[in-house]
Image: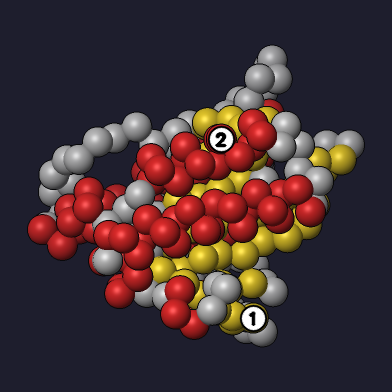
Amino acid sequence: MGIDMNPNWIGVTIVDFINGHEKLVKTWTYNWSNEARSDNNKRKHETIEIAHDIIKKAIHYKCNEIGLEELTMGATDNGKGTWFNKLCNNEWNRTDFQWIIKKLSDKHHIICKLVNCAYSSYIGNILHVELPDPCAAAWEIARRARHQYIAGLCMYPEVDFTNMATLDRWKNTKVDFAKVKTWKDLCKQIKNLGLKYRVQLVDLSNVAVSDFQCKKSGIVIYSNF
């Protein structure tokens, strides 16, 4: 299981790794309403409830490992304005969420790993265009957790950049594929050119929508991608 965290949503993806292949088992995302996120007591309560729900699903699907992003930054000025700073510094219980996930994982004998999340959103969205941004990134987090301590494996997935169907959407842009040798090369070009790479929920069809526990939770679950 991989978990991708953000002040607005939490993406969860469960992947089976069999004989060198990856198979999607289940994926979903919890999306916060503005009201639930901005109320301190409400946000803390729902954070705890979401963590417990995730572990219940990890047990149900017999997950051996859970991968979490290694987010170590404290309160800081992100240079993106007051609203963004408030969102990240005051309306996001990321450390509480990580602590609860680790505690419950230990209780149920599930290995919990913190992984380097560099470029995970870019890579996840490029490789898994059938999934929305948080779920695609969570898949990449799960992959890194699975291969984290295997000698000889790079943190980034090995791919042939000259033969990737998911890169076709940028064929007519200013991306210089002749200079793309690594994931860092590709991600930096996409960022510098300001190209859209995230797969949004509105871009997907047949999405299942449900309230988390009850309508008063202020959390909506999106699934069935």
The first of marks 2 and 1 along the sequence is: 2
What residue lies at 44% left-to-right and 56% top-to-bottom? Answer: 47
Q: How far apart are labels 2 and 1 at the CA level?
A: 30 Å
- Left or right, 73 with reference to 137: left
- Left or right, 37 with reference to 206: left
Residue 211, above or below 72:
below
Residue 54, above or below 205:
above
Colouring: secondary structure
Give the amino acid at mark 1.
Answer: Ala
Name of the residue lying farthest toward the top: 151
Near-viewer residue (135 or 177): 135
Q: Which label belongs to residue 97? A: none
**What is the quadrant of the C terminus in the image?**
bottom right
What residue lies at 29% left-to-right and 35% top-to-bottom? Answer: 73
Residue 27, above or below 55:
below
Q: Position of residue 3 (x, y in %)?
A: 56, 48
Q: Which label belongs to residue 208? A: 1
- Left or right, 149 with reference to 30: right
